[in-house]
Amino acid sequence: MFLTRAERGRIATHGIPEWLWRRDALPLRWREVEGVACRVVSARQLLEERESDPRPPRPKDAAGIAALRRLAARC
C-alpha cells in the first residue's frame, strides 16, 4: 500500500485522504523483513483498525487481535 502525508503531517492511504491514520502509525525506525529494510505499520495502528472494523469478527480475528494487543503493550 502506498502512504502519503496529509495536512499537518497526518499519515493517509494514498488516494484516500479521508483514511487518516494515527500519528505514530509509521514509526521512524526501520525493520528488516527477509533482507529488505522497510518501515512497518505499528501494532497500535493495526489493532485500532481491527477493533473498529464494523464487520462481524471471523474465528481467526480473535487470535490476531490478541497478538496485536501483546505487541502494542510492548511498544
Image (spheres, rainbow, N blue to C red):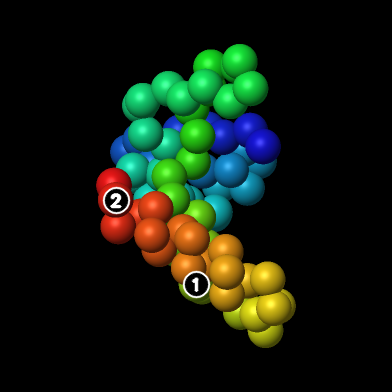
Q: Position of residue 32 (x, y in %)?
A: 52, 22
Residue 7 appearing in the image:
no
The location of residue 9, given as percent across then percent down, is: 35, 35
- Residue beneath label 2, please? 74
Q: Secondary structure at mark 2?
A: helix
Closest to the observer, 55 or 32: 32
Residue lying at the far bottom of the rendered structure:
56
- Which residue matches tag 1? 51
Check the image and report above or below for 12 versus 52.
above
Q: In percent of the image, x 46 and y 25: which residue is there?
A: 31
Label count reads: 2
* Residue visible at 43% across and 50% down in the picture: 43
Which of the 4 image quadrants contains residue 25? Answer: top left
> Residue 44: percent from the left, percent from the top?
39, 54
Residue 39 vs residue 10: left or right? right
Q: CA distance from mark 2 to mark 1?
A: 18 Å
Q: The residue under label 1 is which amino acid type? A: Glu
At a point 42% along the width and 37% down the height, the residue shown is: 26
Task: Give x and y (percent) for residue 50.
Answer: 55, 66
Disc 1, SS: helix
Mark 2 or 1: the one toward you: 2
Q: Residues within 10 Å of mark 1 (few under 14, many from 20)?
A: few
